[in-house]
Image (tube, helix red, strand yellow):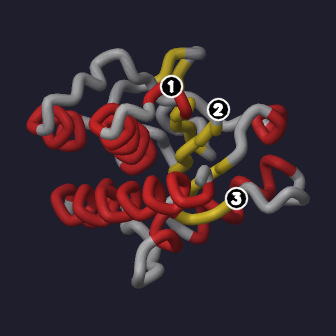
Amino acid sequence: MQKICFVCHGNICRSPMAEFILKKILEENGRTEDFLVVSKATSTEEIYRGQGNPVYPPVREILEGLGIDCSKKRACQLQKEDYEKYDYFIGMDERNRENMKRIFGGDSEGKVSLLGDYTEHPHPIADPWYTGEFRSCYEDIRKGCEALFAQLSESAR
């Protein structure tokens, strides 16, 4: 089983969107048993008194439109010990990558990457919290998850 952890700043927009989109792709391809997919934050901004905030409403609306229920998802923070638990840590932008490496104390096994790097045109996934561009963020994440799935499927052969 391959274990994937998507990471963004707060774990309420981009990384949960990637988590649930990849899970849907896996389900559609009959591969849910081959992967464990989660998402986490590099910050604690969306976590209060040990309770994480839910997925941000515009993201929740997009996912619900795809038939995806993310109502139980709550923001949680990436921890140093997670490095040994997962095979891939996939961030959304360079700041996420830097923060993951800071939390882990490096990336000795080369597990840290960016979702946009799996596409034909590598690019950061802009944070819709700041841009307001939730639909274009979804499109970028969908393309990244499709490309990631294709690469993981190819390497499993």
> Is the residue marked by circle 1 packed among few (<14), some (14-19), or many (20+) residues within 10 Å?
few
* Location of mark 1 (residue): 33
The residue most toward the front is: 157
| Depicted 32 relative to depicted 6: above or below | above
Residue drawn at (66%, 49%), measured in percent from left and top?
A: 88
Element class at badge 1: helix
Camera-nearest label, 3 or 1: 1
Image marks 2 and 1: residues in contact by CB distance under 8 Å = yes
Camera-nearest label, 2 or 3: 2
* Location of mark 2 (residue): 1
Q: Earlier in the sequence, mark 2 or mark 1?
A: 2
Q: Is residue 17 visible?
A: yes
Image marks 2 and 3: residues in contact by CB distance under 8 Å = no
Q: Can you tell which mark lies on residue 112?
A: 3
Side (left or right) of 99 relative to 151 = right
Element class at badge 2: loop
Q: Nearer the viewer, residue 139 or 96?
A: 139
Q: Earlier in the sequence, mark 3 or mark 1?
A: 1
The residues tagged by marks 3 and 1 sit, at their Cα atoms, a distance apart of: 23 Å
Q: Nearer the viewer, residue 48 or 156?
A: 156
x and y percent of residue 42 in the render? 62, 46
Mark 3 is on which residue type?
Val
Mark 2 is on which residue type?
Met
